[in-house]
Amino acid sequence: MNEDAMIRKRCIALYSGGLDSILAIKVMQEQGIEVVPIFFCTPFFGSDALKAPESFQRVHARKYGIHVRVIDYTDDMIQIVSRPRHGFGRHLNPCIDCKIGMLRRAKQLLGSLNASFVVTGEVLGQRPMSQMRQTMRAIEKESGLEDILLRPLCARNIEETLPERLGIVKRDALWDLQGRGRKIQIERALSYGLGEEDIPTPAGGCLLTDEQIARKLRKTFDRCAPSLPDRVDVMLDVVGRKFVFEDSTVLVVARDEAESNLVSTMGCPGNVFLKTSDVPGPLCIMRGRCTSENLKLAAGICLRYGKARGSTGHVAAYGEDSCNLDLTVESPVFSVEYCRTFQD
Ligand code: SF4
């Protein structure tokens, strides 16, 4: 690292929206360091930002005064999940590789963002998989950020970094947190002027740690092998009831209005939307082979989960545009037992 570059007093912060990353940014700003927060999002975490980045940015600017850049990390994550060097956590969460991947992306951005080091909100010993001393060192090395990865919340418990040695960051003003408690963080958040109601609840929103979703995703990876699933395939694993037909065509049925709204954003070539046409029902999406046989099957399942259940002879509307389902298909309403034979 060219030491002149350190004079810029500008860093990139990995921002998760959690309390620790908010505080890490505040600690840096307090020292007069300019911080560029970046937020990585995928369908598994940060899906709000993926769907509506501008509204996400507005909310975080208003609540925390943090002006975040949103980066779509979905394709990276599909690669990582397919073959994590450091393995998985409890379910399909490859936490160490996930962190390394984000830090590598941050490192690549240092030049274009005119920044000299990277900051995270990690706390030594807080997470069993990625925040133990040895692992934190390994992550630094593998991401190529050795000596320029600063963890302000626990910095005084770990080795000094280049920005500290150069006096760009005052080590004395950094923190020495350790372990899983949140009491100190909450006190300090309040002292920074965060409202109690704005303090984020502990993280845990990564869907790769969810048993059901991990199971569906594993099957998707198997079904697509030897290729990797694409982003549309994995998006269908994080919403609704999922059914897979014999030829691997997938049908997802939204379970409520919020899911119907989410499903409506998943239009792309190869996806077909279905909905009961004469009674209220959920929005469904089919991806795969749009044969008349599959459409009938999809319609029968779609009708089952709409208000048509228990009756026969209803019609489902379908089309590629969720707002304009201009074609129809007739099917009997299937029994729930029959539907379940396709459930993934
Ligand atoms: S919990 Fe999810 S987002 Fe967090 S490090 Fe692990 S894989 Fe990445």
Image (tube, rainbow, N blue to C red):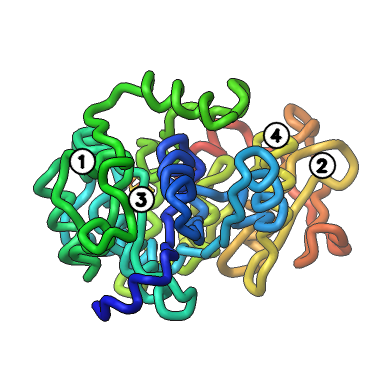
Instruction: Classify mark 3: residues with Cα within 10 Å, few (<14), some (14-19) or many (20+).
Output: many
Residue 337's spot in the image, x, y percent?
A: 53, 31
The answer to whether marks 1 and 3 mark residues whose Cβ atoms lie closer than 8 Å is: no
> In this image, 151 relative to 186: left or right?
left
Q: Nearer the viewer, mark 3 or mark 2?
A: 3
Give the Cα distance between marks 3 and 2.
Answer: 58 Å
In the image as oriented, which residue stretches furthest toward the front?
A: 167
> Judging from the image, what secondary structure is the residue with disc 3 in?
loop
Q: Disc 2 and disc 1: Cα gap in Å?
A: 70 Å
The local crowd at label 2, few if under 14, some if 14 to 19, many if 20 or more residues have their Cα within 10 Å, is few
In front: mark 2 or mark 1? Answer: 1
Is 118 left, or right, of 231 in this rendering?
Answer: left
Residue receiving disc 2: 313
The type of residue carrying mark 4 is Asp
Nearer-N-terminus badge (2/4): 4
Q: Nearer the viewer, mark 2 or mark 4?
A: 4
Nearest to N terminus: mark 3 or mark 4:
3
- Residue at 59%, 29% in the rendered image: 193
Q: Which mark is residue 120?
A: 3
> Please, which residue is most extreme toward the left here?
134
136, above or below 143, in the image? above
Q: Residue at x 25, y 63 (%)?
A: 166
* The N terminus sits in image quarter: bottom left
Who comes first in sequence, dot 1 or dot 3? Answer: 3
State the separation of the CA atoms marked 1 and 3.
Answer: 14 Å
Q: Amino acid at mark 3?
A: Thr
